[in-house]
Image (cartoon, coloured by chain):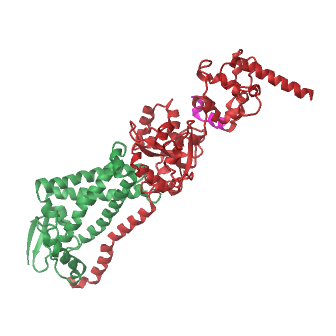
């Protein structure tokens, strides 16, 4: 068995990832207090929950810009990494689903091998495509509109009013919360529970060259 | 019997004397109408001059329609202007009035106890010749009354020190919602102009005349109350909002007290955002749509319960975070989050059972 270190997560990606993680968890907690103030008050007063939610929202929106700028302009690999290929959709998705929900339990290896140019397996690509190109823009844009409901009221009116915005914002946020649970859990599916967390912190992935190769499932995002 | 006749003669004599200066003022009635006796036109002798700009001015001039609508008018001019004599208008001092507290004792003592009383008498806010009940005045007008002394620049600046989204808050809440000791609140909905200077912070309501153009000479209420049952359903609200011919208007909902008191001050619990933002669905259930009437006052029409909670365009631009959350959406959101636990819980359980296969 030989081991090789691969530089999988460059600095901008790691900064973005952890800013995003901190921001989204803060948004989920403060958002929960804002929606259910009579049951949840762990962030102090309602006003502080609002201030924190607004600040975290701006941080996440900015970190989203870092992500987009890095992948699109600096690395120019946005489409390559995030858009599923034809083979991903025809056979890749199926293989990956079989692995996660069947083969994994029998000790079979992950059919996908992460590289800097192909970080995600087909299932990840589809999930991240929806998250980064649909859910994140939706939750950010509705958040920006809600934060500026007065000045941007004409856009709000065109969309159908504050209520519609809130519905989109809330349901998108719930979907992202659901994603966090799945995301963190899948990140523990490496050779050891922390194997996928380390590269997102240090940048370096340890790749083992033997029969039990795994994919860098969650950490590579 | 003789006494009764004598009394009647005196009354007629007074009426005739009073009517003399009003000759030529138009709208003359029978001599009996000039008495201060019972009847709808008992104020006619006074009104004949006091609604005529050529005869009186300033506070002595009153709008016949507005005055006629007040409860004060039903009591008659001389109930308050009790010192008036047959010498009037020759003797000007005859216009001495009674005190508001003579009838509104509780309100006056409540008001006198507040710091506000040092700065303004009753007449500072209320003109007794055109007073309306609280529900007949839109919240926007009530706020304008406060702004006569408390300029909107100062109000905005002082609230901005602690209140996020200051403009939105001040445009959606009656001042007396927080600054009077009210305990129950409702959502009052008005029809506002969409193209105002600042529609959210300083809404401009549609006037009766403007709405009348849209209602095509029908009662303006029927613009929304399409089935004319004097009750506004959520469906009727949605139809109004979705009707492109109403694009210049929008429904402006405001958080208003049911029974405002005259103890004007800042209450400690109003600093706490959750006073409103966790008020729950009970308060949000009740709303009224206020339509302007021809005489300038507003009339409330009951709205189906839950309009403020409706996610589908009943009152699109009213949202009170924390309180107007929609119950169905809460369930859908919870199901989505629970869906996210399928992998950690379900997969994790099978992973645990099959751990030996991966060693």
Whether residue B121 is visible: no
Would you say the magenta stretch is mainly helix, strand or loop?
A: helix
Residue A75 position by quadrant: bottom left
Position in image of residue A11 (x %, y %): 15, 57
Which of the two residues, B33 or B90, is positioned nearer the viewer here? B33
Residue A88 position by quadrant: bottom left
When the figure is inspected, residue B81 is found, relative to residue A178, above or below; the finding is above
Whether residue B117 appears in magenta in the rendering, the answer is: yes
Residue A45 placement, left or right of A26 = right
Residue B147 placement, left or right of A112 = right
Which of the two residues, A175 or B271, is positioned nearer the viewer here? A175
Position in image of residue B50 (x %, y %): 64, 23
Q: As drawn, which residue projects farthest toward the right? A: B1
Q: How many marks?
A: 0
Tell me what residue is drawn at x 32 percent, y 53 percent: A142
Tell me what residue is drawn at x 32 percent, y 52 percent: A143
When the figure is inspected, residue B296 is found, relative to residue A85, above or below; the finding is above
When the figure is inspected, residue A27 is found, relative to residue B69, above or below; the finding is below
Residue B43 placement, left or right of B133 = right
Q: Which chain is green?
A: A
Chain B drawn in what color? red
Which quadrant does the C terminus of chain B fall into? bottom left
Which quadrant does the N terminus of chain B fall into? top right
Whether residue B211 appears in magenta in the rendering, the answer is: no
Q: Which residues are magenta?
A: B107-122
């Amino acid at each position: 068995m030989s081991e090789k270190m691969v530089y999988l997560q460059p600095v901008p990606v790691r900064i973005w990832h952890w800013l995003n993680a901190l921001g989204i968890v803060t948004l989920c907690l403060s958002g929960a207090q804002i929606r259910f103030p009579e049951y949840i008050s762990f962030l102090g007063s309602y006003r502080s929950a609002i201030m924190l939610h607004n600040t975290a929202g701006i941080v996440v929106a900015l970190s989203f810009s870092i992500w987009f700028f890095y992948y699109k302009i600096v690395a120019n690999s946005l489409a390559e990494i995030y858009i599923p290929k034809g083979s991903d959709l025809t056979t890749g998705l199926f293989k990956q689903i079989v692995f996660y929900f069947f083969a994994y339990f029998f000790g079979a290896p992950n059919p996908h091998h992460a590289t800097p140019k192909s970080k995600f397996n087909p299932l990840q690509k589809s999930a991240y495509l929806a998250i980064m190109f649909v859910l994140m823009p939706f939750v950010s844009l509705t958040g920006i509109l809600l934060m500026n409901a007065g000045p941007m009221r004409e856009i709000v009116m065109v969309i159908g009013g504050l209520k519609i915005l809130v519905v989109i914002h809330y349901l998108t946020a719930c979907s992202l919360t659901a994603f966090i649970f799945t995301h963190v859990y899948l990140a523990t599916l490496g050779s050891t529970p922390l194997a996928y967390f380390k590269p997102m912190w240090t940048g370096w992935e340890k790749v083992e060259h033997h029969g039990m190769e795994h994919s860098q499932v969650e950490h590579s995002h | 019997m003789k006494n009764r006749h004598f009394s009647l003669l005196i009354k007629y004599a007074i009426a005739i004397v009073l009517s003399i200066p009003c000759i030529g003022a138009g709208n003359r009635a029978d001599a009996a109408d000039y008495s201060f006796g019972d009847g709808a036109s008992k104020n006619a002798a006074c009104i004949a001059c006091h609604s005529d700009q050529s005869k009186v001015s300033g506070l002595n001039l009153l709008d016949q329609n507005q005055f006629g609508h007040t409860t004060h008018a039903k009591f008659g001019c001389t109930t308050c202007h009790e010192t008036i004599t047959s010498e009037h208008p020759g003797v000007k001092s005859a216009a001495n009035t009674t005190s508001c507290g003579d009838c509104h004792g509780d309100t006056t003592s409540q008001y006198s106890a507040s710091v506000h009383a040092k700065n303004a008498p009753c007449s500072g806010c209320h003109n007794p010749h055109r007073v309306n009940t609280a529900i007949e005045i839109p919240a926007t007008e009530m706020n304008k009354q406060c702004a006569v002394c408390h300029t909107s620049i100062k109000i905005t600046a002082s609230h901005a020190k602690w209140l996020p989204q200051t403009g939105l808050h001040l445009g959606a809440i009656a001042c007396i919602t927080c600054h009077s000791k009210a305990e129950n609140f409702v959502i009052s909905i008005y029809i506002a102009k969409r193209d105002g200077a600042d529609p959210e912070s300083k809404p401009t309501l549609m006037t009766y005349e403007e709405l009348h153009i849209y209602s095509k000479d029908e009662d303006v209420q029927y613009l929304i109350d399409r089935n004319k049952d004097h009750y506004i359903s959520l469906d009727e609200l949605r139809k109004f909002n979705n009707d492109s011919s109403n694009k210049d208007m929008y429904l402006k909902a405001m958080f208003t007290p049911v029974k405002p008191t005259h103890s004007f001050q800042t209450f400690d619990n109003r600093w706490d955002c959750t006073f409103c933002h966790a008020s729950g669905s009970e308060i949000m259930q009740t709303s009224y749509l206020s339509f302007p009437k021809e005489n300038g006052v507003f009339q409330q029409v009951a709205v189906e319960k839950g309009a403020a909670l409706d996610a589908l365009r009943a009152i699109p631009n009213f949202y009170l975070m924390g309180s107007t959350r929609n119950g169905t959406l809460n369930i859908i959101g919870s199901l989505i989050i629970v869906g996210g636990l399928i992998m950690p819980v379900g997969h994790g359980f099978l992973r645990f059972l099959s751990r030996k296969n991966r060693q």
